[in-house]
Image (cartoon, helix red, strand yellow):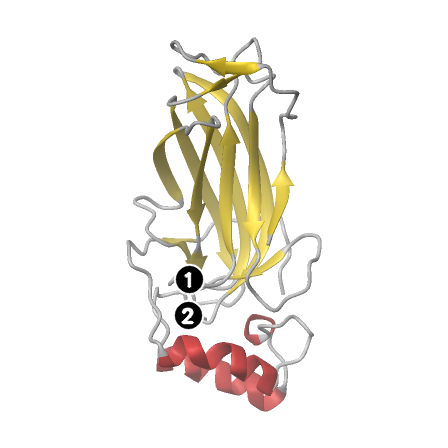
Amino acid sequence: MRFAIVIPVLLLVTSGVAHAQCLPDPNFSVCQLNIIDNDACPTTFPPTLIWCPAGDMSKFEIYIQLRDASNNLCVNTNARIVVNLSGIPATAGNALFGCGFDNVGFQDWAVTTDANGEARIEFWGGGCGCLNVNWQVFSSGAITCSGFGSFCVKSPDLTGDGKINFFDTFQFLPCLQTSTGYCCDFNCDNTVNFFDVFQYLPHLSGAHSCPGNIIPIGVPCGQQCN
């Protein structure tokens, strides 16, 4: 399930397809940050996501559809989607990261639109805390659109080291014993019990990990998550 979070540009009626060199127009193009929801938490605002370094739980998607000044679709058009992540872990001594990001909280994707003028990228990470997502779409050397979102994220990777192992279990067990702990509440029902164990164990037994770079982020975030 996808939830559109930021939609700075509205989609208008399709009038055709641009076959020559296409110059995307911000007034007709569409860009949005979506949540691909694949966790046990209810939909809230601000959104809470449970993500996993392996990318098998909830994650983010940036979707674009480019159109020119005549509202024609821009097909086979090159663009760049740039994402900057910032945030701070909910627990001192742990980390928060975007999986596969080449720099601290920063990644730049080159994309090409399809026959519908569309392109999309997905990203996820690990750790628990507050996450800001700041993104821009560039085409023809200019910013076509941009947006910002603030989220609360949790992960079976409680330590935020890019892999799920018994170091995470050492943090999970005290939560289970006391029935408390924001980061251990994987179904967002405000208590930690065996329902959360059922959420956690498949990731531990599968030794889920990030397939790319692990570069922690840790800067102030505007959303309180605990």
Q: State which quadrant residue 50 falls in.
A: bottom right
Residue 54: image x %, image y %?
37, 63
Identify which residue is drawn at 61% across, 88% down: 178
Label 1 environment density (alpha carbons within 10 Å; few <14, some 14–19, many ≥20): many
Identity, as a three-letter code, of the amino acid under mark 2: Thr
Left or right, residue 117 beside residue 193: left
Dot 2: what SS? loop
Quadrant of the image containing the C terminus: bottom right
Dot 1: what SS? loop
Identity, as a three-letter code, of the amino acid under mark 1: Ala
Label 2 environment density (alpha carbons within 10 Å; few <14, some 14–19, many ≥20): many
Left or right, residue 130 beside residue 100: right
Residue 125: image x %, image y %?
42, 57
Identify which residue is drawn at 57% across, 80% down: 196
Q: State which quadrant residue 105 falls in.
A: top left
Q: For this rendering, which residue is in front, 64 or 152?
A: 64
Identify which residue is drawn at 51% across, 37% down: 63
Q: CA distance from mark 2 to mark 1?
A: 6 Å
Contact (Cβ within 8 Å) of mark 2 with mark 1: yes
Residue farthest to the bottom, as pictured: 177
Residue to which mark 1 is pinned: 95
Q: Earlier in the sequence, mark 2 or mark 1?
A: 1
